Amino acid sequence: MSEATVEILLETAMGVSKKTQDQSGYDYAMAVMKMCDILHLRHTKVWLRPDIIFNYTKYAKAQEKLINTIHSLTRKVIKRKRADFDKGIRGSTAEVPEELKTKNYESKVTSKTVVEGLSYGQSAGLKDDLDVDDDVGEKKRMAFLDLMIEASQNGVVINDEEIKEQVDTIMFEGHDTTAAGSSFFLSMMGIHQDIQNKVIQELDEIFGDSDRPATFADTLEMKYLERCLMETLRMYPPVPVIARQLSQDVKLVSGDYTLPTGATIVIGTFKIHRLPDIYPNPNKFDPDNFLPERTANRHYYAFIPFSAGPRSCVGNKDRFVIVLGEFGKNIDCTVGIIV
Ligand code: HEM
């Protein structure tokens, strides 16, 4: 799954065509996984924390090799993009299938606003109060890396190292979370066959016998799939805790408490998502928790798998539904328990 999400990111965010990808997507995913194992080891084995000790262990050498694998993919992608730009090739090299270029797949959705007073994304529980509904549009077709390289050539001061740092962040943050979310989703489908059948029925209604790729318009019709996805992210958020360091004192409205500047605050997403006063029967997988009438009056921050506020996830939340719509066309999950 991690390999698949690295390749999807390379194609969608970096504009690298599937044809030009090689084994490095798999190597990247494996390197990140092993690198995280070393990081977690340093969390639990306190003597490995000081660099002065860690640097003399076998883990330091392994880490250096893994970081090199991780960085070599991002360097390769940027080099290739720069070369494309020098040859005058602008925009994404990801191939748009001919049928999508010529055919106009009209959305059957008549209104984007499901609940009065809320945007589509907000009423579906996907967006918070800082988000706006500007997801549909030509500008979004350009890959993120293309936009950055184009900006750097149009006078924006950003050098290759800074572009690399941005690419590293997107690749790192984007693939693991999506792989975990997709795996949890498929497990849920395997466990709840009746729910899986409803998802399949919805996808059949959208795609019929066609094996065309899913479009943004299609995702607006994947209402049940979306609810299943939100419910998966509620029960199994890929980022179960978030930490923040306070840059100023914060007075809590819940009582006479002041959290001091410099304190590290841990927000337990997993715990918030299972509060029974917000989600009755919180340990039951119930996609109806995300029916528009149930989400309408729910607090924005009662569902925060992508965090919230100015440093929330930059990954296009709605695109995640496209990925699962693509998987879903051939979905057939059963879950076995090995004893
Ligand atoms: C199911 C999928 C995803 C989940 C659950 C998720 C979740 C999150 C969360 C919780 C954060 C905040 C972390 C923190 O504050 O400590 C975050 C940040 C971020 N995510 Fe995602 N993410 C997903 C997909 C993606 C994708 C596909 C991309 C890239 C295309 C991406 C790029 C980022 C970036 C760059 C940040 C850092 C934003 C910042 O610090 O300003 N994420 N994500």
Image (cartoon, rainbow, N blue to C red):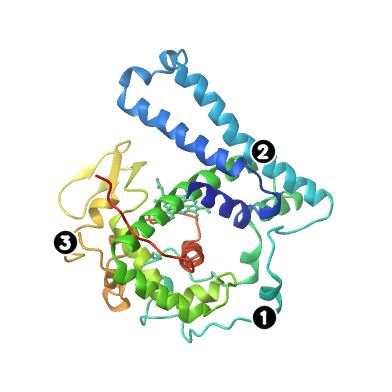
Where does residue 284 sit, x and y in percent of width and height?
21, 63
205 vs 42: above or below = below
Across the whole image, how many numbered discs are drawn on residues? 3
Mark 1 neighbour class, 10 Å CA radius: few under 14, some 14 to 19, many 20 or more: few
Q: Residue at image x 49%, y 55%?
A: 314
**Residue linked to disc 3:** 276
**Residue linked to disc 2:** 75
| Dot 1 beta carbon under 8 Å from ligand 1 | no
Give the quadrant of residue 40.
top left
Where does residue 197 sit, x and y in percent of width and height?
35, 73
Q: From the viewer's perspective, is the residue at label 1 or at label 2 nearer?
A: 1
Where does residue 188 sit, x and y in percent of width and height?
32, 60
19 vs 74: above or below = below
Mark 3 neighbour class, 10 Å CA radius: few under 14, some 14 to 19, many 20 or more: few
Give the quadrant of residue 115.
bottom left
**Residue linked to disc 1:** 103
Q: In screen coordinates, is 295 left or right of 276?
A: right
